[in-house]
Image (cartoon, rainbow, N blue to C red):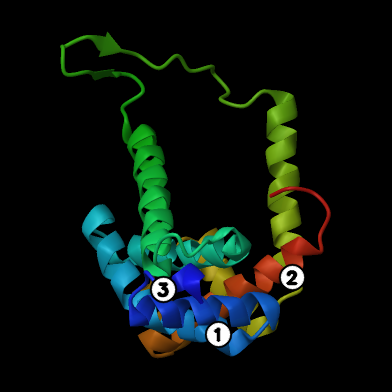
C-alpha cells in the first residue's frame, strides 16, 4: 500500500477501481469510475469548447481514450489528475482542428505581428490516392455501423452521417434526450469493440 499512501482517500478508491478494471475486467469498476468523474469532465470541457454537444462528444471520447490507456496510469498522481489531463489535451486538439477548419482559405489569416498567411489549396484538396483511402475508411466505418443493432445504427447514422444535434435526434426518434445520449454512448462503445476486431485503420 506504500505506493498509494500519498493519495487522498478518494484517489485511493479510484486506484482500487482501476485495479479491478484492469486485473478483473470488472465492468462495474469502469462504470463507477465514469460515474465519479463524468460530470466534472463534461463541465470542464464545456468551459473549453462552449458547446454542450461538442462537450458531450469530447467527454465520451475522453473516457474511451482513458480506458484504452488504463494500463499506462500510475498512482504517482491521482486518477482524476491523469483523466483531466487527457480531457484537456483532447479538447485542445479538437479546438485546434476546428480553428483550422474555420480559417478563411481565400483571405488567409494574420498573426499577432500582422504577418499574413495564406493556405495554398489545390483545386481538389485530395489527390486520387488520398481520396480513395478516405472512401475506404468511410466504407469500413459504414460496415461497422451495419453490424449494430437497428436502434443503435439509426442513432449513429443521425448523429455522425447526418450530423443531427442530440435535440434533433430526440425529436426525430421521439426519445427523451437523456436516453439518446445514453444509447449513443453505448453505440460508440459497441463500435469501438467492433473496430478492434476489424482489420484496417479508421
Label 3, label 2: how many angstroms apart (C-alpha)?
A: 48 Å
Label 1: which residue?
A: 29
The image position of residue 183, as x and y in percent, is 52, 83
Query: Is residue 175 shown left or right of residue 114?
Result: right
Label 2, label 1: how many angstroms apart (C-alpha)?
A: 30 Å
Dot 3: within a 10 Å radius of its alpha carbon, few (fewer than 14), some, or many (20 or more) residues?
A: few
With respect to residue 111, does 145 lie above or below? below
Please tell me the numbered disc located at residue 197: none
The image position of residue 94, as x and y in percent, is 40, 47
Label 2: which residue?
A: 146
Q: Who is closer to the viewer here, 159 or 75? A: 75
Dot 2: within a 10 Å radius of its alpha carbon, few (fewer than 14), some, or many (20 or more) residues?
A: some
At 32% across and 69% down in the image, what residue appears? 42
Dot 1: within a 10 Å radius of its alpha carbon, few (fewer than 14), some, or many (20 or more) residues?
A: some
Query: Is residue 40 shown left or right of residue 176?
Result: left
SS at circle 2? helix
Label 3 vs 2, first from the N-terminus:
3
Q: Who is closer to the viewer here, 64 or 111? A: 64
At 33% across and 19% down in the image, what residue appears? 106
Q: In front: mark 1 or mark 3?
A: 3
Amino acid at each position: 500500500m506504500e505506493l498509494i499512501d500519498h493519495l487522498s482517500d478518494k484517489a485511493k478508491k479510484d486506484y482500487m477501481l482501476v485495479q479491478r478494471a484492469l486485473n478483473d475486467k470488472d465492468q462495474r469498476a469502469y462504470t463507477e469510475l465514469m460515474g465519479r468523474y463524468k460530470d466534472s469532465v463534461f463541465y470542464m470541457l464545456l468551459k473549453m469548447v462552449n458547446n454542450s454537444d461538442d462537450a458531450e462528444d469530447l467527454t465520451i471520447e475522453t473516457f474511451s481514450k482513458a480506458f484504452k490507456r488504463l494500463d499506462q496510469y500510475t498512482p504517482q498522481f491521482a486518477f482524476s489528475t491523469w483523466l483531466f489531463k487527457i480531457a484537456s489535451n483532447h479538447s485542445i486538439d479538437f479546438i485546434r482542428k476546428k480553428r483550422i477548419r474555420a480559417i478563411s482559405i481565400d483571405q488567409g489569416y494574420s498573426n499577432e505581428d500582422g504577418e499574413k498567411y495564406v493556405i495554398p489549396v489545390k483545386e481538389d484538396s485530395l489527390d486520387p490516392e488520398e481520396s480513395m483511402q478516405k472512401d475506404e475508411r468511410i466504407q469500413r466505418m459504414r460496415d461497422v455501423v451495419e453490424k449494430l443493432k437497428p436502434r443503435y445504427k439509426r442513432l449513429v447514422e443521425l448523429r455522425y452521417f447526418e450530423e443531427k444535434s442530440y435535440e434533433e435526434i430526440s425529436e426525430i426518434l421521439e426519445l427523451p434526450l437523456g436516453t439518446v445520449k445514453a444509447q449513443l454512448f453505448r453505440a460508440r462503445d459497441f463500435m469501438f469493440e467492433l473496430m478492434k476486431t476489424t482489420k484496417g485503420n479508421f
